[in-house]
Image (tube, rainbow, N blue to C red):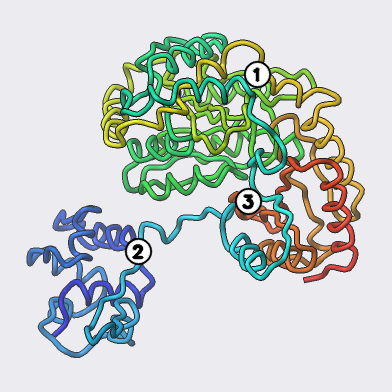
Amino acid sequence: MDTFSNRLKAIMAEKNLKQIDVIRLVESAGKESGIKIGKSHMSQYISGKTVPRQDIMSVLAKALEVDEKWLKGELSSAPVGDSEKNISEKIKISEAGGRTMKEFKKSCKLDNVLYDVRGPVVDEANRMIDAGMNILKLNIGNPAPFGFSTPEEVIFDMRQQLTECEGYSDSKGLFAARKAIMQYSQLKNLPNVEISDIYTGNGVSELINLCMQALLDEGDEILIPSPDYPLWTATATLAGGKVVHYICDEESEWYPDLQDMEKKITDRTKAIVIINPNNPTGALYPKEVLEKIVELARRHHLMIFSDEIYDRLVMDDYEHVSIASLAPDLFCVTFSGLSKSHMIAGFRIGWMVLSGNKAIAKDYIEGLNMLSNMRLCSNVPAQSIVQTALGGYQSVKNYIVPGGRIYEQREYVYKALNEIPGISAVKPKAAFYIFPKIDVKKFNITNDEQFAVDFLREKKVLIVQGSGFNWNKPDHFRVVYLPRIEVLEDAMKKLGEFMSSYKQ
């Protein structure tokens, strides 16, 4: 006779329910009796570690519309469809060395997690590479493979300090590194920042995940831009939150649509995320737009997370403004690092800065500290060069002015894309990405992932489709313009040839 946990998983599979769906169904079915179950209860039930008490079992059976005795394992016959088949599909076993072995599945927490910057299209590219084909990768912002070098002084200083970096640092980071970050924050006018408000991380990515885990409970909502850097949506979803995407408007330089943002705020909304300068669009938000976002957050009592990893890659004499500098009365978390500005993505060094009204986030900060302590510290050799990197002459400036590589490559790719019939693009002001639009009617495109795969297979050029950045239409893709102009020329020629005859 099957166990309760197997039957619960079987009925969930048959009805295509996730744990959060069952929790909500039980809440609805148990309203009169006041019975609810939480995420931890569901995990225990699914794992088979515990069985619900009788009153919860009754409500659970009612919510799932199954016989209570069957759910408990007291009846052998399945009450619906092919539950027994689903059991065998969900908990497959295989013969190994004469023993029956259970097959281990990934956690259902990952069911709605997306990260297509390294997703199915990349998997196909890797298959082609393994088959001996050369693939031009325009899918990821990794400067080193395209001939961008780390400043020599940074490399020299890391070598000099390696023997001093063999042990753990403070969980938040080396004092010298955090002091340099604090001084940089002062230059950016971030209010009320002390050295204890600065956390180093193994890249900004680790810190984003840490922040989401500390903040979100099941059903909590967070506003994230569309398009976005998909790690934000992925980590918020993994933490149990409900991601609500607000639109960035292509017709308005890809600035956030403030009306759309406000109408999506509910009593469950806890925070707003902005990515400025933006990945994947290359947009840079002016002060007046940031002020309106601050006013919205102030009116609705929201936190602000600001991803500013590209703040030193701004072109055309525009100025980057940190939104936290405009919000001394709100609680803000600002992210930055050296991966892009100093071309050391592989070193994995980023940071976050807490600023503004920290009194209203005291409990949240305790959670951040707990999670920071649990990972012990970020890598110490990379921390050791923060002071060198942030001090003195910033060599990245040579790349982002006329004659500099990033500037000239942007100029070329923007012009080349707009010359391809059926393709248009807004000119980026920062970073090294452009997010072109496809005339989907002209090409009959209904699936942008298929478009990316078709282009890859025919022309051996790898891009990321717009849906990989949580854009809800099949009409965009992202190009990384880090390769030298002669390489970009080849890529744009191939794209033009491909689009001249492409139809889905």
Three-letter residue code for mark 1: Lys
First of labels 2, 1 by sequence position: 2
Depth order, front residue of 493/32: 493
Query: Which residue sits at x=56%, y=59%?
Result: 119
Q: Say which quarter of the image contains residue 46.
A: bottom left
What x and y, as percent, mark residue 248? 65, 39
Residue corresponding to mark 3? 471
Depth order, front residue of 21/154: 154
- Please tell me whether residue 231 is drawn above or below residue 175 in the rendered image: below
What x and y, as percent, mark residue 481? 75, 42
First of labels 3, 2 by sequence position: 2
- Please tell me whether residue 88 is drawn above or below residue 205 in the rendered image: below
Three-letter residue code for mark 2: Lys
Q: Are marks 3 and 1 in contact (CB under 8 Å)?
A: no
Residue corresponding to mark 1? 287
Q: Say which quarter of the image contains residue 339.
A: top right
Depth order, front residue of 70/140: 140
Depth order, front residue of 319/339: 339
Q: Say which quarter of the image contains residue 76.
A: bottom left
- Please tell me whether residue 328 is drawn above or below residue 230 in the rendered image: above
Q: CA distance from mark 3 to mark 2?
A: 24 Å
Query: Which residue sits at x=54%, y=47%?
Result: 230
Q: CA distance from mark 2 to mark 1?
A: 42 Å
Three-letter residue code for mark 3: Trp
Left/right placement of residue 376 relative to residue 70 reads right
Left/right placement of residue 307 relative to residue 476 reads left
> What SS does tag 3 mark?
loop
Query: Which residue sits at x=49%, y=26%?
Result: 297
Residue corresponding to mark 2? 18
